[in-house]
Image (spheres, grey):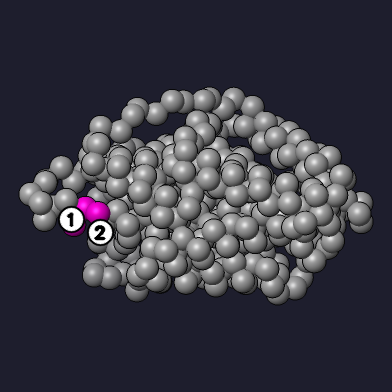
């Protein structure tokens, strides 16, 4: 006789209606002996996701968007269990696993509801498309893993992280401005130091990639902000609007910088937007959505040229030997070194995404929102017109 799990899957996973889910859940709810096999099969679906290029944070983000928080927690439980079998995980996976939500108790609130939620999750996992990998899957041969040196976080990144945390926490715009500007300067100098060191030691390091979530609402503005941060830190970002993330391509130190700065600027922008919106509502305005959209669009675009200007200034200082970091002055050798790295990043991005498109986004419609967003970006000492978006379809 066909196992209960196979019967339930046949009813639920290969149809789109709720009737199939209900039928499959009824079969599983009536047979507690199927519980272990049901969980094991879920781990298989997760393993297939790794083979298709997905990583833990990607899976949970999509499940949360397409289903709900309960399903995201169920997925997290499967991911933690599946990845526990590997002795070594790819770069960035440990941080993603640490950020997952807790798995809910099994068979709660009742067996039928739990089985229905699990089958809905499995239906989604089964249909995940293949996406561009940004690293090897877990369990790959250590010789095939591009791993960073096995040491603690570089001291420079620790300093940058502390500066941005202070910028997010302060209630004084001028202080946040100074802290954020200092952080970007340190990022640019750190990138230059790493580039010069790699050139002097004839390093074989190649560009890598990471994915950063770009969540609704106002995801277009957030994608523009991430694109601006990436460009200013010698990386390229490709936004996949359907799957809710951007893939950032660059050298490892620069990827770390982009992730840190984007996250911080998004926090700072959201705080500034909330304060500005409160003032607008106190004056009787009710167009919250258009105000927020326009605010974030202005904030993102205004930051673009200022971020780029900060990087250009630090690079010029290093090129003349007046602003280099601990590795020594760059001098006339700096620009060719940086140009070679920029070319390597561009080549890698184009190989990963040969069919990207450039899209002009619709302009903001709320003047007050745009004005306040521009002012917030000015206070963060970042402004000007941002880059166009490059969009990829995320598939192969």
Q: Is residue 99 above or below residue 187?
A: below
Residue interval drawn in magenta: 275-279
> Is residue 349 in sight in this rendering?
yes
- Residue visible at 48% across and 53% down? 381
Magenta stretch: includes residue 276: yes
Say which residue appears at 46% left-offset and 60% top-offset: 177
Q: Which of these two is toward me, 178 or 263?
A: 178
Going 44% across and 55% down the picture, which residue do you hit?
Answer: 380
| Residue position for label 1 | 279
> Which one is in front, 124 or 195?
195
Q: Residue 370 appears in which quarter of the rendering?
A: top left
Q: CA distance from mark 2 to mark 1?
A: 7 Å
Describe residue 181's horizontal placement relative to residue 296 as left or right: right
Query: Is residue 82 in view?
Result: no
Q: Is residue 40 left or right of residue 65?
A: right
Question: Do the residues bearing badges 2 and 1 touch, measured as CB atoms within 8 Å?
Answer: yes
Horizontally, is 326 left or right of 76 in the view?
Answer: right
The kind of secondary structure the magenta stretch mainly shows is: helix
The residue depicted at 76 percent of the width and 70 percent of the height is: 150
Residue 215 coordinates in the image, percent (x, y): 39, 48
Q: Give the secondary structure at mark 2.
A: helix
- Near mark 1 (Cα within 10 A), the count class, few <14, some 14-19 or many ≥20, is few
353 in relation to 276, above or below: above
Residue beneath disc 2: 275
């Amino acid at each position: 006789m066909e196992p209960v799990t196979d019967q339930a899957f046949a009813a639920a996973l290969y149809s789109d209606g709720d009737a199939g889910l209900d039928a499959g859940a009824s079969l599983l709810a009536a047979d507690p002996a199927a519980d272990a096999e049901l969980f094991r099969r879920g781990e298989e679906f997760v393993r297939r996701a790794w083979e298709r290029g997905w990583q833990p944070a990607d899976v949970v983000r999509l499940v949360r968007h397409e289903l709900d928080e309960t399903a995201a927690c169920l997925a997290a439980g499967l991911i933690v269990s599946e990845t526990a079998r590997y002795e070594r995980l790819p770069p960035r996976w440990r941080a993603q696993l640490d950020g997952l939500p807790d798995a809910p108790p099994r068979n709660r609130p009742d067996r039928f509801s739990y089985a229905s939620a699990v089958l809905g999750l499995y239906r989604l996992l089964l249909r995940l498309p293949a996406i561009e990998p940004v690293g090897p899957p877990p369990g790959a041969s250590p010789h095939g893993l591009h791993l960073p040196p096995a040491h603690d976080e570089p001291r420079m990144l620790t300093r940058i992280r502390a500066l941005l945390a202070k910028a997010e926490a302060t209630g004084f715009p001028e202080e946040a401005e100074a802290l954020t500007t200092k952080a970007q300067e340190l990022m640019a100098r750190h990138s230059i130091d790493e580039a010069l060191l790699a050139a002097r030691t004839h390093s074989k390091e190649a560009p890598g990639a990471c994915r950063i979530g770009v969540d609704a609402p106002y995801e277009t503005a957030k994608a523009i902000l991430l694109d601006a941060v990436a460009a200013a830190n010698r990386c390229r970002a490709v936004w996949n609007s359907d799957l809710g993330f951007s893939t950032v391509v660059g050298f490892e130190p620069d990827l770390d910088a982009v992730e840190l700065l984007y996250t911080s600027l998004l926090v700072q922008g959201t705080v500034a937007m909330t304060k500005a919106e409160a003032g607008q509502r106190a004056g009787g305005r009710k167009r919250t959505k258009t105000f927020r959209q326009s605010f974030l669009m202005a904030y993102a675009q205004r930051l673009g040229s200022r971020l780029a200007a900060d990087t250009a200034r630090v690079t010029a200082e290093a090129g003349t030997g007046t602003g280099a970091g601990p590795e020594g002055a760059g001098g006339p050798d700096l620009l060719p070194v940086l140009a070679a790295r920029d070319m390597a990043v561009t080549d890698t991005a184009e190989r990963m995404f040969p069919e990207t498109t450039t899209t002009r986004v619709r302009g903001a419609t709320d003047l007050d929102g745009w004005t306040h967003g521009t002012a917030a970006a000015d206070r963060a000492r970042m402004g000007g017109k941002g880059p166009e978006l490059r969009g990829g379809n995320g598939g192969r």
